[in-house]
Image (cartoon, grey):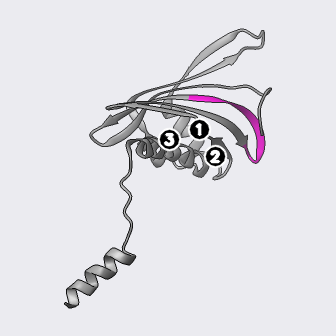
Amino acid sequence: MKYFFILLTVVTYGVTVKAQTAEDSVKAVINNLFTGMKNADAVLLKSCFADSMVLQTISRDKEGKLVVKNEDPAGFIDFVSKQKPGAADERISFETIKIDGPLAIVWTPYNFYFNGQFSHCGVNSFQVIRFSTGWKIQYLVDTRRRQGCAQ
């Protein structure tokens, strides 16, 4: 009888355990990326990226011509980790997430602040892969602009 009341108490007031969905897991790796940036945490940043990760940005040159720049993920991690915590603050919203087995695409509009000052806005487009160790960012391309930003 004693065990019945313990069981009843656990069921009535029990711990609610919510299983993490695939979408939650994908969001987690992306949120970890931006937490790592804000905290200047090289270890956390590196843990978000696949070994063969590709990093690109789309912008305009001085003449207004569209350019796609390849960036070195290791160089990005090194640069960000040398900033003071809080300096690199990218604020995102999750607009679209699509998942098919081990592949996810994620679209996140953002505003970027550097040292507390608005810098630019744009959109991140992620390709995320679920490896045996979990979701990792395989490809990230973003746009960057200063006009048309909702702050």
Identify the image quadrant of residue 15.
bottom left
Residue under label 2, please give it.
Answer: 83
Q: Mark 1, residues whose alpha carbon is within 10 Å: few (<14), some, or many (≥20)?
A: few
Which label sits on residue 43?
Answer: none
Residue type (three-letter) at the residue carrying disc 3: Ile
Q: In which quarter of the image is the C terminus?
A: top right
Q: Where is residue 109 in the image (x, y as percent from the top left)?
A: 64, 33
User: Which sits earlier in the primary sequence, circle 3 or circle 1?
Assistant: 3
Q: Where is residue 70 in the image (x, y as percent from the top left)?
A: 54, 20
Residue corresponding to mark 1: 79
In this rendering, the answer to whether 55 lies above or below 37 is: above
Q: Disc 1 to disc 2, how far (Cα)?
A: 7 Å
Of the numbered discs 3 and 2, the one sitting upstream in the chain is 3
Residue at left offset 79%, top offset 27%: 148
Location of residue 111 by image quarter: top right
Residues in magenta, as a range: 114-124
Which residue lies under the disc numbered 3?
30
Residue type (three-letter) at the residue carrying disc 1: Phe
**Residue 76 placement, left or right of 21:** right
- Confirm or deny contact between disc 1 and disc 2 (CB under 8 A): yes
Q: Which of 51 and 25 is in front in this view?
A: 25
Q: Is the magenta stretch mostly helix, strand or loop?
A: strand
Q: Which amino acid does label 2 sit on?
A: Gln
Residue drawn at point x = 40 percent, y = 37 percent: 136
- Foreground of the two, 101 or 36: 101
Question: Element at badge 1?
Answer: helix
